[in-house]
Image (tube, grey):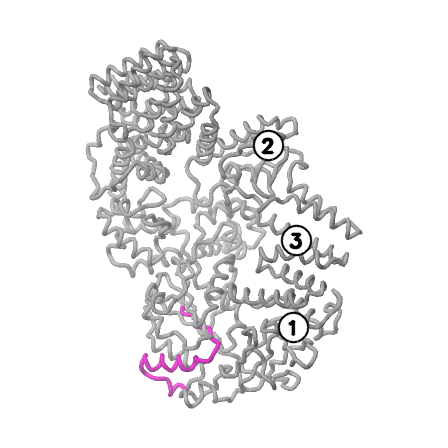
C-alpha cells in the first residue's frame, strides 16, 4: 500500500488504486496525510474542503467522507500495513508508517543527497527523489486554501531539488545535462528568476553563450510586460558573468568591489540642473521656478531588441555625472540593473553607478507609507501590471474601510524609483462630511509643486488642467487621486505624459472613467484570515497574538477581514494591555453592540459606512436597510424585493446602486452578498422594519419553493395549506423546467435552512416547518445528504404549534430519511405515530403517505405481510381521495414488496396500474423505479428478453434525466443476468457520477 501526494492524491494497492471518489474526499485524505500521525480537527478539515462559508451540514459531510474513506481502507486490508483512520474526540488521525507516504520518502532522499560527498551519488538520489513526482502536488483534490498552500510548498521543494540536481551535474562538468534538466522547468515557470539564472549559467558553461543571452532577454521582457519590474540580482549577476566571459562560478563573487558584479537598484533618471528652464516648465510653459527636467524623448535611443541604448558620447567614463538631456546610469542590455554596456569595440565590463550628488530632490506630496500593512500580494502585482501600459490610469475600488488608500500608498512607496520626476497626491474627499475640494485648488497645489510661480497659475479649471498636462508631458510622474466620487472629478487631474501613472481610489466603480480613459480596475476585497491576524500582530505585537491564536482568528472573523475594523479592534486592545483577545472577541460576538465596539473617536466602521450611505438615492438606502434583516447569506432581486416590499425591477436598480458603492457584491449574475458589518449597519438603519422584512422574505421563500416543487414534481400534492396571514410576494420566480427548479432548491438550501431557523427564533413556527418541508423534491433526490437535522427542526416547530397535521407530515418525511440513512429503529418509532396524527387532523392523504413509509421499513425488517397490508390500505385511501400522485407512489412500493414476496404477476399488475395513472413525462424518478420493478418481474417469470428491454429502458431514462441512483439500480439488475460490456461501462459511470456528486 502506498499513499501519494506528489501527483494525483491516491492510495495504490496490490490490486490497483482505491476508488476514492469526489474531490472533497481526496481533499480530506490529503489533509490527513499532510499531518500523518497527528490529529486534524474538524475545523481544519472544514477549511480544507470549503473556500468560502461552509454549509450548515459541513460536519455531517466530513463524517460521511471519513466513513467512506475508512471503509475503503479496511476493504484494502490497510490494518496489515499498520494503517488506521481513528477518531479522537473532535478530530481524526490517519496513522501509518511514514515509509508508505511518497512525500516523506521524497524528503528522506533529499536529506541523504545533501549528505553525499560524491556529486555522482547525489545525482542518483536526487533523480530517485524526483521520480516520485507523477504530476502537480495534490492533483484531483479540491483546492482549498490550506491545501493550496501545502501544494505550493511541495512544488517549491521540487523546484529547489531540480536546481540542486543541476548543480550536482555542474559539479561533474555535465553542463549540457544541467541545462536539459533546467530548461523544462524554466519553460513551465518562466518568471522564476532563479531557474532562468541557473539555466543561463549552464548554457554558457556548455559553450552555448548565444542561447544563454537569448534566455536572459526573453525573461527580462516577460518580467517587464507581466510584472513591470526589472530582473533581480540573480538574473543580473548571471548576465554580467556571461558578458565578462567569466570562466568559473566564483569569478564574479571574488572580484574587487565595484567590478565583477552588477550594481543593484535603478539609477535616478532626469533632474537636470537646479536652475534649468529648458524643460516643459520653462518660459514656454509659463513657469519661472525650478522645475526638474524630464529626459527628452528625442534622446531615447533604441537598440536592436527595442531596449533604450546609450548614445555615442554617453559612456560614464567620459561623463561621470549626468549631462542635461542625457541618461544617468543606463542599463545593461536595457535590463535596468544599473550598469552600462561599453561600445562594441571595447570588451564589455561592468562599471559602478554614477554619483547622484547634487541632483535636485523630486517633488513628493505622498503621505507616509502605511504602518502595519499586511498581505495584498496579488493586488500589488495587479497594480504593477496595470501601471505597465501607456499613460495608464489604475483604479483601486472597494468598500469603505477595505484599505484602498493603504494599498495605493504602499505601492507608491515601493515603486518610488520608477517616478524620478515626482509623486503627487490629492485627497478628493468624495465621501467626506467636509465635501469635495474645488478642482482649481487641487490643480493649483499640483502646479505649485511642479515649480509654477503662484502668479502664473491660471484661474480657470480648464486652463490650469491644460497647463498641468503640458508640464507633465515628458515626465515620469505618479499622480495619486484618493477618494474620488465621480469620473468627472478625476479627468481634469490626469497628467499628459505617456510615462506618467495615475492611481485613483474610490468606493464607486467609476465605470465612466473606464470607458473614457481605459482605466484599469483593481478591485479590493477583505483580507484573508492569515493576513488579518498578521495585521493584529503588527499593532499588538506578535507575542500577544501568539499567546491567543484561536481568539486572534476569531477576532479576525468577527471583523470580517475588513482592515478598518481590524485596526480599530487592535487600537482598543493596544490601549488596554490587561484585556484579553478572547474577552474582546466575546464582546464583538454580540451583533447588537459589534459596530459600537468598532468605533474609536472619529474613526470607525459606522462612520465610514455612513459617509458612503449618505451619497445614495433613497431607494438604495431603503433597500440596504431591509437587506440588513435578511436571514440568509446571499440574495437575488426577488429576495431583495420581498425584503424591501418592492418589485424585482426596483430592487435590481437599487442593488446596482449599492454595488457601485461597494456595499453589496455580485458574485454571479443575479446573485449578491454583503459584508457582515454592512449587514449589521443596514439592520441598525431601520430596526423597526425587521419583522415586516422577515415575514416578507419568509413568504417569498414559501412561494418560490412551492413553484419549484410544482415544476420539479408536477402533479405532486403540495404538502400543506398556506398560513392564514400569508403575504404573497409582488412577483414569484418562474421555473421553466425541472433542472432549473432543482438547481434553485440546491443552491438555496443553506438560505432556506437559515430562513427556517430565523422563523423559529422569531416565533413564526408556521413558516419554519413549511419552508423545510417544501424542499421535499431535493430531499427525495439527494436523500443521503444529511437532511435529518433540518427535519428535526421542522418537527420542533410543528410541535410548538400543537399542529397534528404539520407533525404528521414532517414525521412522514423524517422517518423515510432515517430509513434511508440506516437508522431503522428510530424511523419506526416516528412513523408509527404518523398515521394516528394524520387521522386526528383529518388528513387522509397524509395518512396514506405515512402508511407507505411505515410499510417500507416493515418490509426491510422482514414483516412483509404487515407491509403489504399497510401499502394496500394506502392505495385505497388515495383512490378514495382521487389523488393519482399518492396512488402512484403507493402502487410503486406495493409492486416492489409483491416482487420481494415472489408474487411477480401481482407486481406487474401494480406497475401497470401505476403507469396508467399519469403522463409518462411526469414523475421521472417514479417511472424509472416502476420500469425497473417491471423488468425484474419479467425476469422472475423467465421472460428474459422483455425483462432486459425494460431494465435497459429504465436505465436509459434515468441516465437522460440525471437520476443516477435509478440508473445504478436498473443496471445492477441487468448485470445479474447479462455480462454485456456496455452495461458494465454504464454502471461504472453511473456509480462514479453518484459518488462524485455525493
Local secondary structure at mark 3? helix
Q: Earlier in the sequence, mark 1 or mark 3?
A: 3
Q: Which residue is mark 1?
A: 263
Report whether residue 433 is seen: no
Q: Is residue 929 above or below residue 392?
A: above
- Give the position of the C terminus as an image quadrant: top left
Comparing 856 with 397, the one in front is 856
Q: CA distance from mark 3 to mark 2?
A: 31 Å
The reply to whether residue 713 is in sight is: yes
Magenta stretch, residue numbers: 453-481
In the rendered image, the residue lying farthest to the bottom is 283
Q: Residues within 10 Å of mark 3 (few under 14, many from 20)?
A: some
- On the rendered image, what quadrant is the N terminus found in? top right
Residue 604: x %, y % from top left: 40, 57
In the figure, residue 320 lies in which quadrant?
bottom right
Please name the residue that numbered disc 3 is placed on: 160
Q: Which residue is label 2 attached to?
A: 16
SS at mark 1 in the image:
loop
- Which is more toward the observer, 51 or 128? 128
Q: Residue at x 35, y 30 (%)?
A: 957
Nearest to the observer: residue 356 or residue 495: 495
Residue located at (56% from left, 73% from top): 305
Whether 343 is drawn above or below 997: the answer is below
Image coordinates of residue 894 in percent, x first then y, are 32, 16
Query: Separation of disc 1 and disc 3 at Cα?
Result: 26 Å
Q: Viewer-nearest of labels 2 and 1?
A: 2
Amino acid at each position: 500500500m502506498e499513499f501519494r501526494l506528489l501527483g494525483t492524491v491516491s492510495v495504490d494497492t496490490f490490486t490497483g488504486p482505491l476508488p476514492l471518489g469526489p474531490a472533497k474526499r481526496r481533499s480530506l485524505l490529503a489533509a490527513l496525510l499532510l499531518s500523518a500521525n497527528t490529529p486534524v480537527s474538524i475545523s481544519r478539515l472544514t477549511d480544507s474542503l470549503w473556500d468560502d462559508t461552509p454549509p450548515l451540514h459541513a460536519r455531517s459531510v466530513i463524517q460521511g467522507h471519513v466513513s467512506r474513506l475508512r471503509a475503503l481502507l479496511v476493504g484494502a486490508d490497510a490494518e496489515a500495513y499498520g494503517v488506521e483512520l481513528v477518531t479522537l474526540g473532535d478530530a481524526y488521525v490517519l496513522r501509518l508508517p511514514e515509509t508508505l507516504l511518497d512525500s516523506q520518502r521524497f524528503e528522506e532522499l533529499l536529506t541523504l543527497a545533501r549528505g553525499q560527498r560524491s556529486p555522482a551519488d547525489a545525482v542518483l538520489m536526487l533523480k530517485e527523489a524526483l521520480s516520485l513526482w507523477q504530476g502537480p502536488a495534490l492533483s484531483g483534490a479540491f483546492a482549498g486554501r490550506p491545501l493550496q498552500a501545502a501544494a505550493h510548498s511541495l512544488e517549491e521543494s521540487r523546484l529547489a531539488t531540480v536546481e540542486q540536481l543541476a548543480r550536482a551535474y555542474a559539479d561533474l562538468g555535465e553542463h549540457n545535462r544541467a541545462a536539459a534538466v533546467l530548461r523544462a522547468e524554466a519553460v513551465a515557470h518562466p518568471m522564476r528568476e532563479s531557474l532562468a539564472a541557473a539555466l543561463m549559467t549552464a548554457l554558457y558553461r556548455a559553450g552555448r553563450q548565444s542561447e544563454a543571452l537569448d534566455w536572459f532577454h526573453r525573461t527580462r521582457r516577460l518580467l517587464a510586460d507581466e510584472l513591470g519590474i526589472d530582473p533581480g540580482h540573480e538574473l543580473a549577476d548571471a548576465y554580467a558573468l556571461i558578458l565578462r566571459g567569466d570562466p568559473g562560478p566564483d569569478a564574479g563573487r571574488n572580484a574587487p568591489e565595484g567590478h565583477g558584479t552588477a550594481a543593484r537598484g535603478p539609477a535616478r533618471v532626469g533632474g537636470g540642473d537646479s536652475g534649468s528652464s529648458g524643460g516643459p516648465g520653462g518660459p514656454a510653459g509659463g513657469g519661472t521656478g525650478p522645475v526638474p527636467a524630464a529626459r527628452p524623448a528625442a534622446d531615447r535611443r533604441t537598440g536592436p531588441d527595442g531596449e533604450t541604448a546609450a548614445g555615442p558620447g554617453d559612456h560614464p567614463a567620459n561623463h561621470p555625472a549626468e549631462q542635461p538631456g542625457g541618461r544617468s546610469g543606463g542599463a545593461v542590455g536595457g535590463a535596468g540593473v544599473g550598469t552600462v554596456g561599453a561600445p562594441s569595440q571595447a570588451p564589455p565590463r561592468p562599471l559602478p553607478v554614477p554619483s547622484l550628488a547634487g541632483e535636485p530632490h523630486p517633488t513628493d506630496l505622498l503621505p507616509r507609507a502605511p504602518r502595519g500593512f499586511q498581505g495584498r500580494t496579488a493586488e500589488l502585482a495587479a497594480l504593477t501590471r496595470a501601471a505597465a501600459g501607456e499613460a495608464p490610469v489604475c483604479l483601486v475600488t472597494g468598500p469603505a474601510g477595505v484599505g484602498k488608500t493603504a494599498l495605493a500608498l504602499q505601492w507608491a512607496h515601493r515603486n518610488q524609483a520608477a517616478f524620478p520626476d515626482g509623486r503627487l497626491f490629492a485627497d478628493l474627499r468624495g465621501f467626506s462630511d467636509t465635501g469635495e475640494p474645488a478642482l482649481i485648488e487641487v490643480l493649483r497645489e499640483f502646479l505649485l509643486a511642479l515649480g509654477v510661480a503662484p502668479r502664473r497659475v491660471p484661474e480657470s479649471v480648464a486652463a490650469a488642467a491644460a497647463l498641468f498636462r503640458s508640464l507633465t508631458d515628458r515626465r515620469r510622474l505618479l499622480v495619486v487621486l484618493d477618494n474620488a466620487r465621480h469620473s468627472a472629478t478625476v479627468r481634469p487631474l490626469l497628467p499628459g505624459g505617456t510615462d506618467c501613472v495615475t492611481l485613483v481610489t474610490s468606493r464607486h466603480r467609476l465605470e465612466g472613467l473606464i470607458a473614457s480613459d481605459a482605466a484599469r480596475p483593481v478591485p479590493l476585497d477583505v483580507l484573508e484570515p492569515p493576513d488579518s491576524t498578521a495585521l493584529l500582530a503588527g499593532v499588538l505585537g506578535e507575542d500577544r497574538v501568539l499567546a491567543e491564536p484561536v481568539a486572534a482568528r476569531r477576532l479576525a472573523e468577527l471583523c470580517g477581514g475588513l482592515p478598518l475594523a481590524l485596526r480599530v479592534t487592535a487600537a482598543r486592545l493596544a490601549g488596554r494591555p490587561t484585556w484579553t483577545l478572547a474577552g474582546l472577541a466575546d464582546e464583538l460576538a454580540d451583533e447588537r453592540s459589534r459596530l459600537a465596539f468598532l468605533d474609536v473617536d472619529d474613526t470607525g466602521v459606522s462612520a465610514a459606512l455612513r459617509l458612503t450611505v449618505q451619497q445614495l438615492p433613497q431607494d438604495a438606502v431603503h433597500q440596504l436597510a431591509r437587506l440588513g434583516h435578511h436571514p440568509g447569506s446571499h440574495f437575488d432581486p426577488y429576495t431583495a424585493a420581498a425584503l424591501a416590499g418592492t418589485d424585482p425591477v426596483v430592487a435590481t436598480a437599487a442593488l446596482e446602486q449599492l454595488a457601485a458603492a461597494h456595499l453589496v457584491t455580485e458574485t454571479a449574475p443575479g446573485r449578491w452578498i454583503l459584508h457582515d458589518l454592512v449587514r449589521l449597519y443596514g439592520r441598525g438603519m431601520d430596526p423597526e422594519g425587521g419583522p415586516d422584512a422577515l415575514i416578507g422574505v419568509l413568504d417569498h421563500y414559501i412561494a418560490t419553493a412551492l413553484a419549484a416543487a410544482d415544476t420539479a414534481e408536477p402533479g405532486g400534492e403540495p404538502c400543506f395549506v398556506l398560513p392564514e396571514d400569508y403575504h404573497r410576494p409582488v412577483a414569484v420566480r418562474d421555473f421553466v423546467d425541472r433542472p432549473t427548479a432543482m438547481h434553485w432548491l440546491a443552491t438555496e438550501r443553506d438560505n432556506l435552512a437559515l430562513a427556517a431557523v430565523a422563523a423559529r427564533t422569531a416565533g413564526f413556527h408556521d413558516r419554519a416547518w413549511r419552508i423545510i418541508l417544501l424542499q421535499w423534491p431535493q430531499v427525495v433526490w439527494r436523500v443521503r445528504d444529511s437532511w435529518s437535522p433540518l427535519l428535526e427542526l421542522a418537527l420542533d416547530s410543528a410541535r410548538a404549534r400543537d399542529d397534528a397535521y404539520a407533525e404528521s407530515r414532517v414525521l412522514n418525511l423524517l422517518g423515510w430519511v432515517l430509513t434511508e440513512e440506516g437508522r431503522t429503529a428510530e424511523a419506526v418509532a416516528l412513523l408509527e405515530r404518523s398515521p394516528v396524527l394524520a387521522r386526528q387532523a383529518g388528513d387522509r392523504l397524509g395518512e396514506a403517505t405515512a402508511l407507505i413509509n411505515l410499510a417500507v421499513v416493515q418490509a426491510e425488517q422482514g414483516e412483509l405481510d404487515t407491509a403489504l397490508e399497510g401499502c394496500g390500505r394506502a392505495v385505497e385511501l388515495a383512490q378514495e381521495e382521487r389523488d393519482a400522485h399518492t396512488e402512484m407512489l403507493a402502487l410503486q412500493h406495493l409492486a416492489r414488496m409483491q416482487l420481494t414476496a415472489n408474487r411477480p404477476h401481482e407486481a406487474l399488475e401494480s406497475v401497470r396500474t401505476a403507469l396508467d395513472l399519469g403522463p409518462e413525462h411526469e414523475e421521472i424518478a417514479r417511472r424509472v423505479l416502476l420500469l425497473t420493478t417491471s423488468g425484474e418481474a419479467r425476469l422472475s417469470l423467465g421472460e428474459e428478453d422483455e425483462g432486459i428491454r425494460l431494465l435497459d429502458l429504465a436505465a436509459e431514462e434515468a441516465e437522460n434525466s440525471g437520476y443516477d441512483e435509478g440508473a445504478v439500480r436498473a443496471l445492477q439488475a441487468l448485470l445479474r443476468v447479462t455480462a454485456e460490456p456496455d452495461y458494465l461501462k454504464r454502471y461504472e459511470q453511473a456509480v462514479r457520477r453518484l459518488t462524485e456528486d455525493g
